[in-house]
Amino acid sequence: MRVRDEDMGKVTGFLEIDRQVAKYQPASDRIRHFREFTIPMSDPEVQKQAARCMDCGIPYCHGPTGCPVHNQIPDWNDLVYNNNWEAAIQNLHSTNNFPEFTGRVCPAPCEEACTLNLEDAPVAIKTVEQAIADKAYELGFIRPQPATVHTGKKVAVIGSGPAGMAAAQQLGRAGHEVHVYERETKPGGLLRYGIPDFKMEKNFIDRRVEQMKGEGVTFHCGVNVGVDLKIEQLLADHDAVLYCGGSETPREAGIPGTDLAGVHDAMPYLVQQNRRVGRENIDSVGWPSDPILAGAKHVVVVGGGDTASDCVGTAFRQGAVKVTQLDIRPQPPEKEDKLAVWPFWATKMRTSSSQAEGAVREFQVATLEFIGEDGVLTGVKCCEVDERRRPVAGTEFVIRADLAFIAIGFRGPFTTSVLKELEGKLTLNTDKRGSTNVVANDRDYKTSVDKLWTAGDVRRGQSLVVWAIREGRQAARAIDEALMGSTVLPN
């Protein structure tokens, strides 16, 4: 529901003000550290960008094409333009528990759906969103909001990624006693251990955890449910259990030579470096613990997505000599056909900040084999492929490699804990790509096991942080309604 009915404060802003977004530190500077490198814009600059919002008759940025959590973007743009930061964060929080996360790591499908994107100059929605959250912390607007009435119901949440955290916060505010169980030593899931600090520093997670503790949520870290603590026990001790285990099992590449020393899946590499930055031991449950470092090495990254890009940026910061990224897809066009794809996410040439730090990108290339000597990786054999991804004869070539990462996605949650304990009881679905997810619909989020709900990547497959937040919020509403007969939590 729209909050404001009157016109935007600057109805001609989009005509008078050019699009600007926050700038980055130069690549030569930012690869020397693992901190965030975005240079914040001043409040007046942010307000000018908020003033560009057109208050469209049909704001596609809301969703479902734009924002999975249905952020009321024109409303908080107007509030920022009018210097009402407190109302802006209240509006933003009404749909999104963690805008400081999404303001940093979301790819911003809302900007793709912005009407001004028809002219390649969308409102800088992501920049404004991050600015609202950061300003709210600065001014002390983000505080615990404990429930005034307690229901006497007890809920367990397995996993403290964005889905688990969002659900736990909503359920705690509804008055339930909430316990979050996390396998790792600190909360956050792959927000903490998968996303590099140069994209999002982890003090933002810590702040939210402290807020949630102030709202009565209890975190139990270092507990691997299904191994250290049986899920059957959780189900017996709680009125509801929500499984938000994420999607962490790497997709199998089927490439010969993956057993060579120097060939790794992407996630153990990223987890290790995040633990180093967080001054933790690199040993982690479920991941290999032998040190993986790219210093003074030629690195090849197989895959074209965000995880691959995170490997690229991490390798540069560790001192890699050269980083080559292989993408089996054709090189996309520089610009999309607006009339054919808008307001949906377009396939076009995009360069991440990590790729811009000096990566060599090879498109329409298949990885045929990892080759080596005496069991150690020395190169990656590749070839060009046609439009159906079939190898083109005579196009084979070898790229020198001392280290290679496979970053081609994930096929589901770890199978050694919850899924293993509930084998035969929990209904799973395997799609055509071999991904296995827990079956539950996106209305009540109930699984085939009594008192067990599920949300996030473990249900929908690997996806965006913003989708995890949406699912966590919706699952919390479903659980609250099931326990209480009705709910005041937003849909």
Image: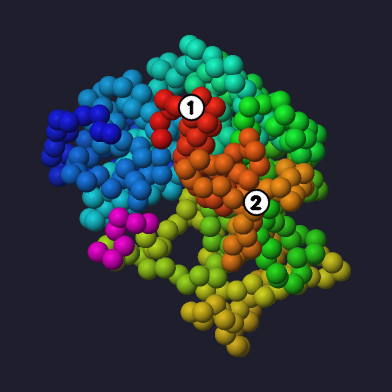
Circle 2 sits on which residue?
427
The quadrant the N terminus occupies is top left
Does residue 22 appear in this view?
A: no
Question: Which region shows up in magenta?
Answer: 339-345
Point 78% across, 35% down: residue? 230
Point 66% across, 60% down: residue? 251
Circle 1 sits on which residue?
485
Point 61% across, 52% down: residue? 437
In the rendering, at what x and y percent does residue 224 appear? 75, 36
**Nearer-N-terminus badge (2/1):** 2
Mark 2 closeness class: few <14, some 14–19, many ≥20 residues within 10 Å: some
Contact check, label 2 and label 1, Cβ < 8 Å: no
SS for callout 1: loop
Mark 1 closeness class: few <14, some 14–19, many ≥20 residues within 10 Å: few
* Amino acid at the residue labelled 2: Thr
In the image: residue 258, left or right of residue 16 = right
Image vertical order of residue 378 relative to residue 181, above or below: below
Residue 194 painted magenta: no
How far is mark 2 from mark 1, CA to CA?
A: 26 Å
In the rendering, at what x and y percent does residue 429 appear? 62, 57
In the rendering, at what x and y percent does residue 98 appear? 47, 32
Point 56% across, 47% down: residue? 440
* Amino acid at the residue labelled 1: Gly
What's the mark number on residue 156? none
| Numbered-mark total | 2
Quarter of the view holding residue 205 = top right
